[in-house]
Image: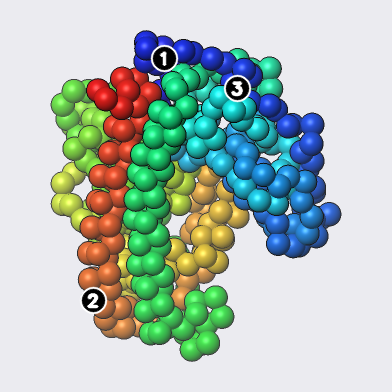
Amino acid sequence: MISHTSFRADVPIVTLGDVVEFLDSKRKPITESERVSGPYPYYGANGIQDSVAEWIFDEELVLLAEDGGHFENPDRGVAYKISGKSWVNNHAHVLRPTNEVHIDYLKHVLKNMDLMPYITGSTRLKLNKSSAERIKIPLPPFAEQQLTAAILDKADEIMRKREQAIVKLDELAQSTFVEMFGDPLTNPMQLPTAKLEEITIKITDGEHLNPKFTEYGMPIVMAGNVLENDVELTLAKKVSTEDGHKFRKKCKPEKNDLLLVSRGATIGRMTIVKSSDEFCLMGSVILIKVNLSKVNPTYLTTLLKFPHMRSALYKTSGSSAQQAIYLKDLKNQTCLLPDIINQNKFGEKIKSINLARKLQIESLHQSCNLSSSLQHQVFTTGLNA
């Protein structure tokens, strides 16, 4: 993220209101019950919300979240470009750039901008029009804007390809699952089912009180330390060894357990514990201690990633600003339960898929780091630094 205090000193600084026209008066919300399905995208604060039969815009524009945007987690997107026939609701500002600013450059500036100084509200953050107009952005010559946008677009394209590869590998794992066990939604093989709490030893979460962090001691894993294919222990905060063992009396993560993020920007992310190192958990992470005589951890994580299973998890989420997956509902989640021998065969089959997925995730992280470095450079020191 960049802020106006870190902009390059050699380029003019302008306000957003100087270089765009706000078309907010033309946007219009349509309640879900009144939407008629059609070919045109229906946009809101966080991208496409639906498809509708009519359109109100037909040009290249930049949308900037007004309320309901991920202002505290900008990696999830608060600004994006649209083109062609579309409909925009009242949760996103509609910006038409003037001839002074390249549209893709504007998109990248707003995507990478720290907008919190312009935000109002506490429970539901909002970027109103008068505040949005005051957002300061650097404005180098148009040719440099164009080159900057091309470089950052290329970095985004590389990340998209990595993300698409990960999705394809997930689909391959799920197709292997269906081949062996059938669709878990319809259960065509009429396999037995069980509640999640019946095939696990324990389902609980970590420490809810704010612990005292220490320089040395035991790692305490938070939501951000739960990665797609592993648990990040080296960068995790630490608590005293004494406190760590106290927290582990309630919630003792061990090898082959599942960790599930219960709230925050990565809600729903799951991983299998592969390390034998001792660590403890914060309350934003749920521990699913698998009964290995009944369920294979790889089988269970694949099952829980199916769309209808994810949907069931998210139905347990609260309607407040802070979503959460609740323990009592998770325990009652119904799971398809083939015999453990075939579950283990499935686990062996997708080892190579998981290895390829891990490599793609590592490449994605490298691409993200490169993109962040490029963004910082172009907006703070320039292309020739």
Q: Which residue corresponds to the image point at 62% horizontal and 42% vertical from the top-left?
A: 60
Q: Which residue corresponds to the image point at 77% horizontal and 46% vertical from the top-left?
A: 56
Q: Quadrant of the C terminus?
A: top left
Can residue 327 be seen from the camera position used here? yes
Q: Spatial distance from mark 1 to mark 2, Cα to Cα?
A: 57 Å
In this rendering, the label closer to the viewer, 1 or 2: 1
Crowding at label 3, few (<14), some or many (≥20) Cα neighbours within 10 Å?
A: many
Left or right: 48, with 286 as reference point: right
Judged from this view, the residue extending furthest toward the front is 143
Q: Is residue 357 above or below residue 107?
A: below
Say which quarter of the image contains residue 342: bottom left
Q: Which residue corresponds to the image point at 55% horizontal and 40% vertical from the top-left?
A: 80
Name the one closer to the observer, 15 or 125. 15
Q: Which mark is residue 11?
A: 1
The x and y percentages for residue 314 are 56, 54
Q: Which residue is mark 3?
A: 19
Q: Secondary structure at mark 3?
A: helix
Crowding at label 1, few (<14), some or many (≥20) Cα neighbours within 10 Å?
A: some
Left or right: 196, with 154 as reference point: right
Q: Name the amino acid, label 2.
A: Glu
Q: Which residue is mark 2?
A: 348
